[in-house]
Image (cartoon, rainbow, N blue to C red):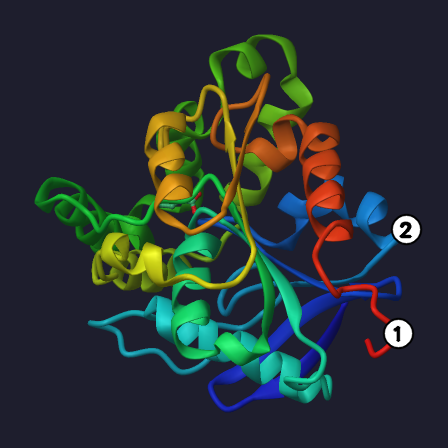
């Protein structure tokens, strides 16, 4: 992996391929490897950049307020600093694909850094903020995770992340999800949970999104269910909505081929993307 310095610390990332830019942003508590099933297929046509958000994978946690954690806006700002460090400016806009927490970050990216954005792929993410109960659960995990360890988080979250069918028939996917969650640093889990607990409700913002958008969801997603994601797609002008079969929440890992097909179809049909001026 490569790494660049940013104002809040350092971001590790992989970069492959040439062509239109695709930035893949992982979810919680994961790292860039959750996109392993996409990288090869996408790099046949695109320049793909896959970072580890601060604290996850190979990126150090950097500067964090221990009580407030890292906000979704701050992660989005980190991504812009990564692009800046790679001298990717507003004249080379990115297709940003955000999975779950990566989607929460994507809303902030759209709101604050629209001119850097070519198109949006929202994968198994929510627009609403947390209920009081969900928020309390996040803050409890943030407080306790140092004592629990990430392996316990993997045990707690596993059944929600993966479809029952995948659990039964794809032990290698289950093991891969457990592995990545289980090796995540407790301090990164705490910082992200505190940040997600404070994330705003973006529902009213959806109708203002002007970039082409693809909304993807696993048919058996229990965290961001298809009906909820369909309402997100209906609220965003002209958004495309695709349900991925044989997948729960971890759609890119559970059914990578279907995700790749949907993303490649969407990106290659974006207007102007392949015009001579780009
Ligand atoms: C994720 O996959 O990023 C998480 O499930 C998001 C969340 O905890 O809301």
Q: Residue at x 35, y 78 (%)?
A: 64
Q: Indicate left or right for 146 with 9 as reference.
A: left
Which residue position holds label 1? 276
Which quarter of the figure is the C terminus placed in? bottom right
Q: Nearer the viewer, residue 252 or 147?
A: 252
Mark sitting on residue 175: none
- Determine which residue is flagged by label 2: 44
Mark toward the viewer: 1 or 2: 1
In the figure, is residue 13 to the left or right of 155? Answer: right
Compared with residue 188, is residue 84 higher up or lower down, i.e. above or below? below
Q: Residues within 10 Å of mark 2 (few under 14, many from 20)?
A: few
Residue located at (55% from left, 74% from top): 79
Residue 220 position within the rendered picture, expressed as x and y whole percent measured from the top left: 45, 19
Q: What is the quadrant of the N terminus in the image?
A: bottom right
Where residue 84 appears, as percent x and y from the top left, is 64, 87
Distance between the Cα atoms at labels 1 and 2? 19 Å
Q: Give coordinates of residue 85: x percent, y percent.
A: 67, 88
Foreground pick, 270 / 117: 270
Give the percent coordinates (x, y) of residue 244. 58, 25
Q: Is mark 2 within 8 Å of ligand 1?
A: no
Number of other residues with Cα within 10 Å of mark 1, as a class: few under 14, some 14 to 19, many 20 or more = few
The answer to whether 182 appears left or right of 205 in the picture is right
């Amino acid at each position: 992996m490569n790494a660049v310095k940013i104002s809040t610390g350092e971001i590790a990332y992989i970069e492959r391929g040439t062509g239109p830019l695709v930035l893949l942003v992982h979810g919680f508590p994961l790292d860039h490897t959750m996109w392993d099933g996409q990288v090869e297929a996408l790099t046949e046509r695109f320049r793909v950049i896959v970072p580890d958000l601060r604290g996850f994978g190979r990126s150090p946690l950097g500067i964090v307020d221990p009580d407030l954690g890292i906000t979704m806006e701050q992660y989005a700002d980190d991504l812009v600093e990564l692009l800046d460090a790679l001298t990717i400016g507003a004249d080379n806009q990115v297709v940003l694909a955000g999975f779950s927490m990566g989607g929460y970050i994507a809303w902030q990216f759209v709101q604050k850094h629209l001119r850097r954005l070519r198109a949006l792929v929202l994968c198994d993410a929510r627009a609403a903020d947390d209920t009081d109960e969900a928020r309390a659960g996040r803050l409890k995990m943030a407080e306790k995770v140092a004592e629990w360890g990430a392996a316990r988080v993997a045990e707690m979250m596993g059944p929600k992340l993966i479809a029952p069918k995948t659990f039964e028939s794809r032990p290698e996917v289950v093991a891969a999800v457990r592995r990545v969650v289980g090796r995540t640093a407790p301090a990164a889990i705490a910082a992200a949970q505190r940040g997600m607990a404070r994330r705003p409700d973006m529902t009213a913002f959806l109708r203002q999104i002007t970039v082409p958008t693809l909304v993807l969801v696993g048919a058996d997603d229990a965290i961001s269910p298809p009906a909820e994601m369909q309402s997100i797609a209906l609220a965003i002008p002209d958004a495309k909505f695709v349900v991925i079969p044989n997948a729960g929440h971890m759609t890119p890992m559970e059914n990578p081929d279907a995700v790749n097909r949907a993303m490649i179809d969407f990106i290659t049909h974006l207007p102007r993307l392949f015009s001579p001026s780009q």
